[in-house]
Image: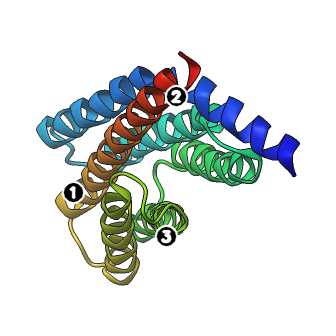
C-alpha cells in the first residue's frame, strides 16, 4: 500500500510539471469555439466535418490527459479518447448523414463527457475548483438530452451544440491546468 501511495505521489509530481500544456490546450479549445461560431456552416456536411475535427481533437486531448492520471483514471481517459476518435471518424465517413444522426452523435459525445466530468469532480470533492467540473458535467448532460430529444432543430442549433462542447472542453482544460499548477506548488516546498 505504501508503494502505491509513493507511485501516485510521483505521478502527481510529474504530471504537475505539465500544467502549462493543459492551459495551452484549454486556450486552444476556446479559440476553436470562436472559430466555430464565426464559420458560415449552412450545410449538415460542413457541420459533420467540423464535428469530426472537434471530436478527434478531443480524443487526442484525452490520450494526453492519460499522462496526468493515476492508473484507474488512465483507463477511463483511454475509453473516452477512443469514443471521441470513433465519433470523429464516423462524422468524416458519414458526412451526408441526416441531421438526426449527427445530432444523436453530438448527444452521445456530450453525455459520455458529462458523466465523466461529474464522476471526476465528485471523486475529487474538496480539491481546488472541483465544483467547476461538476457544473460543466451537469451542463454537458443537459445539453446531451436536449440534443438527443430535439431532432427538428436547425443547422445553427447543431453548430451551437458543437460550440458548447468545445467551450466546456476549454473550461475543463483550464481548470485542470490550475489544479496541476497548485499541485506543483505544493510539491516544491516538500522537495526543498
Q: Nearer the viewer, residue 158 or 55?
A: 55
Q: Nearer the viewer, residue 191 or 82?
A: 191
Q: How far across and how far down the image is residue 108, in percent? A: 51, 67
Q: Residue at x 34, y 44 (%)?
A: 175
Name the residue furthest top. Answer: 192
Q: Is residue 93 above or below residue 107?
A: above
Q: How far across and how far down the image is residue 168, in percent? A: 31, 52
Q: Do the residues under discs 3 and 1 have CB atoms within 8 angstroms?
A: no
Name the element at disc 1.
helix
Q: Do the residues under discs 2 and 3 have CB atoms within 8 angstroms?
A: no
Q: Is residue 75 above or below residue 38?
A: below
Q: How far across and how far down the image is residue 169, in percent? A: 36, 47
| Disc 3 residue crowd, few under 14, some 14–19, many 20+, Cα 10 Å | some
Residue bearing mark 3:
122
Q: In which quarter of the view is residue 19 placed?
A: top left
Give the number of marks.
Answer: 3
Q: Residue at x 46, y 52 (%)?
A: 96
Name the element at disc 3.
helix
Q: Is residue 122 visible?
A: yes
Q: Is residue 18 visible?
A: no
N-terminal-most mark, 1 or 2:
1
N-terminal-most mark, 2 or 3:
3
Residue 160 circle label: 1
Left or right: where 90 falls relative to 47: right
Task: State the CA–CA distance, disc 1 to disc 2.
Answer: 40 Å
| Disc 1 residue crowd, few under 14, some 14–19, many 20+, Cα 10 Å | some
Residue bearing mark 2:
187
N-terminal-most mark, 3 or 1:
3
Name the residue furthest bottom. Answer: 149
Amino acid at each position: 500500500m505504501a508503494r502505491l501511495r509513493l507511485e501516485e505521489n510521483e505521478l502527481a509530481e510529474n504530471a504537475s510539471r505539465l500544467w502549462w500544456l493543459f492551459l495551452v490546450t484549454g486556450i486552444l479549445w476556446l479559440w476553436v469555439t470562436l472559430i466555430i461560431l464565426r464559420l458560415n456552416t449552412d450545410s449538415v456536411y460542413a457541420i459533420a466535418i467540423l464535428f469530426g475535427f472537434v471530436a478527434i481533437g478531443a480524443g487526442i486531448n484525452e490520450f494526453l490527459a492519460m499522462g496526468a492520471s493515476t492508473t484507474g483514471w488512465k483507463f477511463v481517459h483511454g475509453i473516452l479518447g477512443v469514443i471521441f476518435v470513433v465519433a470523429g471518424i464516423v462524422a468524416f465517413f458519414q458526412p451526408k448523414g441526416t441531421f438526426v444522426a449527427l445530432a444523436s452523435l453530438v448527444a452521445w459525445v456530450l453525455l459520455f463527457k458529462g458523466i465523466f466530468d461529474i464522476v471526476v469532480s465528485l471523486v475529487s470533492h474538496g480539491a481546488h475548483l472541483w465544483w467547476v467540473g461538476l457544473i460543466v458535467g451537469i451542463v454537458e448532460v443537459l445539453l446531451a438530452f436536449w440534443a438527443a430529444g430535439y431532432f427538428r432543430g436547425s443547422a445553427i442549433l447543431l453548430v451551437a451544440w458543437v460550440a458548447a462542447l468545445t467551450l466546456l472542453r476549454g473550461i475543463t482544460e483550464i481548470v485542470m491546468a490550475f489544479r496541476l499548477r497548485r499541485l506543483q506548488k505544493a510539491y516544491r516546498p516538500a522537495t526543498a
